[in-house]
Amino acid sequence: MPHHQERPAGALAHGPAKPSDIERVRRQLARTEAQHATIEPVVERAMGEMVAACQTIRKDLNEIERAIEAPPPNARPRG
């Protein structure tokens, strides 16, 4: 099923574009660019939050690994 704004090839106008067609496309392009401009900062912020979360997880994991590798504080040498 075609998108509600799509038309079959036979329904398209033939010949040069009319000024109203050009203006319509310019408005659509401006609207699309504005939508992308508002979405981009949101995506950038979300990516920054994910990077910060990954760094925190790595730090916590390193602390856990060091705790596992360290000898117990009350351990007596065997001998």
Image (cartoon, rainbow, N blue to C red):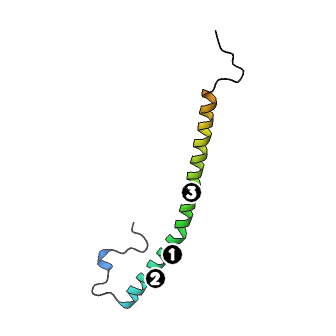
Badge 2 local density, few (<14 within 10 Å), some, or many (20+)? few
Mark 3 crowd level (few <14, some 14–19, many ≥20, 10 Å Cα): few
Mark 2 / mark 1, whichever is N-terminal: 2
Which residue ends up furthest to the right in the rendered image?
74
Q: Which kind of residue does numbered mark 2 sit on?
A: Arg
Residue that mark 3 sits on: 48
Q: Is residue 13 above or below residue 34?
A: below
* Helix, strand or loop under label 3: helix
- Of labels 2 and 3, earlier in sequence is 2
Q: Closer to the camera: disc 1 or disc 3? A: 3
Q: Which residue is mark 1?
A: 34
**Which numbered marker is on residue 27?**
2
Horizontal and vertical percent position of residue 38: 54, 70
Residue 32 shown left or right of residue 42 in the figure: left
As rendered, which of 57 and 74 lies closer to the eye? 74
Query: Tag 1, which secondary structure?
Result: helix
Residue 60: percent from the left, percent from the top?
Answer: 62, 40
- Compared with 59, 28 (above or below) is below
Which residue is drawn at the image coordinates 61% and 32% (left, top)? 66
Q: Quadrant of residue 75?
A: top right
Q: Tell me which numbered mark, 1 or 3, is placed earlier along the sequence.
A: 1
Residue at the outermost top position: 79
